[in-house]
Image: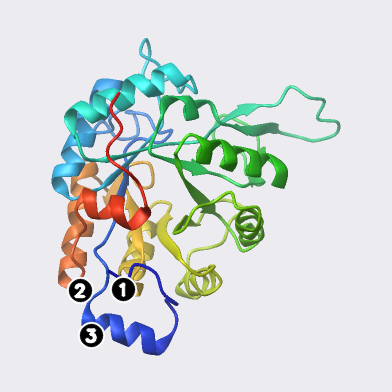
């Protein structure tokens, strides 16, 4: 099975249309940092996230991406490895084959910020110890405008820190998914490859519409895809109602997609989604209509170079 190629090469593209694209890998990001007052169908507790993992797997997703919440109060996020481990175990019980993907968390920096207005954060690798099979690797830096109840903020890191986290993932047999928010992050991806921190095939997430990241457009998607290194499997995601536009383009290109309530709480403008299953089912339907078969969990593991399911 050919799983990577020059996605923007006309001859190769036509060949894959004629002979068949690789099966589609669907990641469902089920929660994110949202709360139930934004959409009451959001799974937030560990038990709800476990149930959601089983439901989206049955609907067609092969990877589930989570943000941990505390057991005492599921409105409160946590970076505690033991809590992620417990949630991972609940997911494995509900879906024995699904690939478990933990987020990379961020914590405020206590260092002197000088004249910087806003909050400075750094990425943290706490959930590594929870033994996820895939984990997001955010290269940063990224800056965010002020929200409803807070000032602007900066998520920061360095080439060396990103390399250290990637090496820790490799040593723990965790597949990094490198998040690329704008073209400058291609330099960091190349740096990780040069330092042999990533195993082939490289697994990247192209993110569109994030503040200080690359804007959503077909042209920007093609630019990012065109500049990926060889032997890269890419997924796309975007924020809000732009998500389905970007993911449809990725399906047509031969890439893979991320959907879920972390990315969009709505199904259509003005219509809240009934849940993660509805969002996954839409992706499955679009893929089928354009001739892309959805991968099984085992096919996704083989394509990404991930071994047998981790037991918790």
First in sequence: mark 1 vs mark 3: 3
Q: Is residue 263 above or below residue 208?
A: above
Q: Nearer the viewer, residue 41 or 148?
A: 41
Q: Position of residue 187 (x, y in %)?
A: 66, 60
Number of other residues with Cα within 10 Å of mark 2, as a class: few under 14, some 14 to 19, many 20 or more: few
Quarter of the image for the C terminus: give it: top left
- Name the residue that disc number 2 marks: 290
Measuring 38% from the left and 38% from the top, which residue is drawn there? 133
Number of other residues with Cα within 10 Å of mark 3, as a class: few under 14, some 14 to 19, many 20 or more: few
Measuring 35% from the left and 70% from the top, which residue is drawn there? 249
- Name the residue that disc number 1 marks: 252
Q: Is residue 50 left or right of 12 when viewed as pictured? A: left
Mark 1–mark 2 CB contact (< 8 Å): yes
Measuring 48% from the left and 74% from the top, which residue is drawn there? 222
Q: Position of residue 265 (x, y in %)?
A: 32, 43
- Name the residue that disc number 3 marks: 18
């Amino acid at each position: 099975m050919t799983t990577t190629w020059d996605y923007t090469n006309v001859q190769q593209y036509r060949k894959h249309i004629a002979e068949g694209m690789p099966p589609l890998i669907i990641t469902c990001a089920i929660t994110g940092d949202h709360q139930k007052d934004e959409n009451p169908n959001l799974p937030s507790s560990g038990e709800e996230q476990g149930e959601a993992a089983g439901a989206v797997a049955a609907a067609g997703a092969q990877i589930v991406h989570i943000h941990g919440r505390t057991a005492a109060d599921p409105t409160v996020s946590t970076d505690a490895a033991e809590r992620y481990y417990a949630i991972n175990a609940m997911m494995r019980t509900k879906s024995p084959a699904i690939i478990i993907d933990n987020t990379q968390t961020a914590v405020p920096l206590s260092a002197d910020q000088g004249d910087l207005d806003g909050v400075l954060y750094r990425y943290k690798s706490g959930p590594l110890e929870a033994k996820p099979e895939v984990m997001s690797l955010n290269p940063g830096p990224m800056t965010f405008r002020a929200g409803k109840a807070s000032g602007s903020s900066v998520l920061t890191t360095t080439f060396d820190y990103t390399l250290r986290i990637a090496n820790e993932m490799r040593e723990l047999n965790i597949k990094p998914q490198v998040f690329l928010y704008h073209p400058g992050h291609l330099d960091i991806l190349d740096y990780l490859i040069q330092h042999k921190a990533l195993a082939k095939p490289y697994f990247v997430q192209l993110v569109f519409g994030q503040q200080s990241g690359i804007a959503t457009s077909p042209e920007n998607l093609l630019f990012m895809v065109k500049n990926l290194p060889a032997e890269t499997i890419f997924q796309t995601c975007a924020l809000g109602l732009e998500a389905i536009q970007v993911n449809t383009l990725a399906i047509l290109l031969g890439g893979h997609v991320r959907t879920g309530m972390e990315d969009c709480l709505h199904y259509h403008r003005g219509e809240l989604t009934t849940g993660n299953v509805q969002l996954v089912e839409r992706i499955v339907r679009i893929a089928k209509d354009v001739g892309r078969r959805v991968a099984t969990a085992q096919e996704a593991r083989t394509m990404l170079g991930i071994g047998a399911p981790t037991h918790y």
